[in-house]
Image: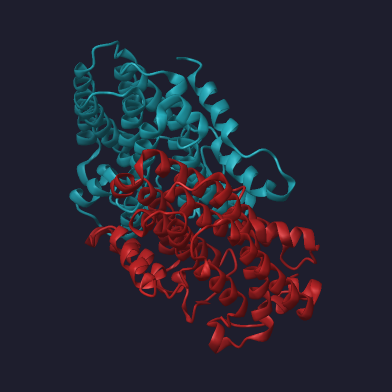
Chain colours: A cyan, B red
Amino acid sequence: MTDRPEKIENALLSYLPADDESIRTVIESMKYSLTAGGKRVRPVLVLEFARLCGGTEEAAMPFACAIEMIHTYSLIHDDLPCMDDDDMRRGKPTNHKIFGEAAAVLGGDALLTLAFETVLSEKAVRLNGFEKCALAGRLLASCAGAEGMIGGQIIDLESEGKSVAIDRLRLMDRLKTGALIKAACLLGCISAGASDEQKKAAAEYAECIGLAFQIVDDMLDVTSDEATLGKPIGSDAENDKSTYVSLLGLEKCRSLVAELTDEAVSSLSAFGGDTSFLSDFAGKLRDRRS
Amino acid sequence: MTDRPEKIENALLSYLPADDESIRTVIESMKYSLTAGGKRVRPVLVLEFARLCGGTEEAAMPFACAIEMIHTYSLIHDDLPCMDDDDMRRGKPTNHKIFGEAAAVLGGDALLTLAFETVLSEKAVRLNGFEKCALAGRLLASCAGAEGMIGGQIIDLESEGKSVAIDRLRLMDRLKTGALIKAACLLGCISAGASDEQKKAAAEYAECIGLAFQIVDDMLDVTSDEATLGKPIGSDAENDKSTYVSLLGLEKCRSLVAELTDEAVSSLSAFGGDTSFLSDFAGKLRDRRS
């Protein structure tokens, strides 16, 4: 499992269009952000839930790549001047800083499109069959669309500079980050042909680590430093942004993250096999410094 | 068939997310451009090829809607200030002029995502089966992605203000406009379970009307007026843009469009049934004034 990040990166690159001078800019834009040091949280979840439910890494890999493509496109578009207007991401210039805004918009569009091409590719169908690929694509689309991730992004944008109640913050995060993490866990289940009970447990795990992940993000914006985090810190407070930290305080956040991590680990009891990777993973997300 | 545009519009609206106060901006952004008076060229082609190959309008409708969603998203993103920076489209303010740039980016993203959700929806699968829906989604993605429509858009952007050879112009249009028109004709074939021979003929028809369509577009920019066209005319010349008109002259364009339309009509002989709608359609595209 230790070579997973490398395997994921190689698989991601294999799905990119072959180099072609006339469309090189958009391919380079896609490649730059796909390989810009992402933590691969979502694809790892796809692969591990597939393994846990008796599936293969090979069959789950196209689904894992697709969700990372969607996550990556969302970061490119989020960073645009008309959105969050961020110059740095993971310690590197953001996509539009390198390729310009037009190629960043198009690179993001192309990654979103490629995600569906990948899920429905000949390879994916050969390994999973038409039904699982179609269900995977449907799940991806519903979690990434207006009632999922994009909905969370619009709530985020409209909350800017406003004080926001905890319920709205929770809804925003459930959509903006939670939906895709849930999709990741369920995509692994779909590839492996998991039972409904296993899918329910995977969704519970996803909801707990999804919320914990977001709370930790808010905490790091207060407790980390720019070099460790790879982006400026203190930006939430500077932008008068309501966060779990501003609404609940750092101590309450810390205990909430601990509780959610415990809940996530408990939900794994529904699975028969070795769940140590996923319990460790939840712990690592809790303890992460960047 | 005369009530098709209304049926298409109703079907498009039925696939939009239900109204929800917290994500209303993005839903309104999607709805505004979906209902902004498009000619519905692509969905009509889906429905007509499905009918001609023995399929039903009901089964082809989700595919027809999906391609119109992709076409619509591409217009929203094309009009953005960082792309073509257009204020008007079909006689109405462009999406970002009404909703702002962020909601225009997100509305476009959401329409692209919804296209795949629609092709893979429960309804689409009930009417077409998993295999046809997966193949339809795969075709849509490959025609809309970096090696299709998006590739054409990047070539267009990088050709701005440059004089461009006819081959490059042709490649650009084959990708930017042609790929989606071809996808439309083939989606109808997929829904109906058409033969390979029928698919080949549909692709030929699509290639001819796709190129004719683009040449007519270039001609209208010279010969039409703003009120008829719904957008400023003369913009190609103003931007020093190489077009079929600037490269070949108006007369040569006119005869080329006539030839291509004849070829499109000839390709229809591969179909057994009544092809008058599609021959008339090719003629109408040739003779259109806006």
Q: In x, y percent, where is residue B101?
A: 46, 65
Camera-side residue: B39 or A30? B39
Tally of numbered tags: 0
Q: In x, y percent, where is residue B23?
A: 28, 59
Q: Residue furthest front?
A: B272
Answer whether residue B63 is visible to the viewer in this image: yes
* Relative height, residue B268 to residue B218 (above, below): above
**Residue at 34% across / 22% down in the picture?**
A192
**Residue at 81% across / 62% down in the picture?**
B165
**Residue at 31% across / 58% down in the picture?**
B15
Q: In x, y percent, where is residue A120?
A: 46, 37
Answer whether residue B25 is visible to the viewer in this image: no
Camera-side residue: B115 or B74? B115
* Relative height, residue A13 to residue B254 (above, below): above
Q: Quadrant of residue B196?
A: top right
- State the quadrant of the N terminus of chain B: bottom left
Answer left or right for A109 relative to A233. Answer: right
Q: Quadrant of residue B240?
A: bottom right
- State the quadrant of the C terminus of chain B: bottom right
Q: In x, y percent, where is residue B58?
A: 33, 57
Q: Quadrant of residue B43?
A: bottom left
Camera-side residue: B10 or B156? B10
**Residue at 45% across / 51% down in the picture?**
A78
* Relative height, residue A190 to residue B248 (above, below): above
Camera-side residue: A74 or B39? B39
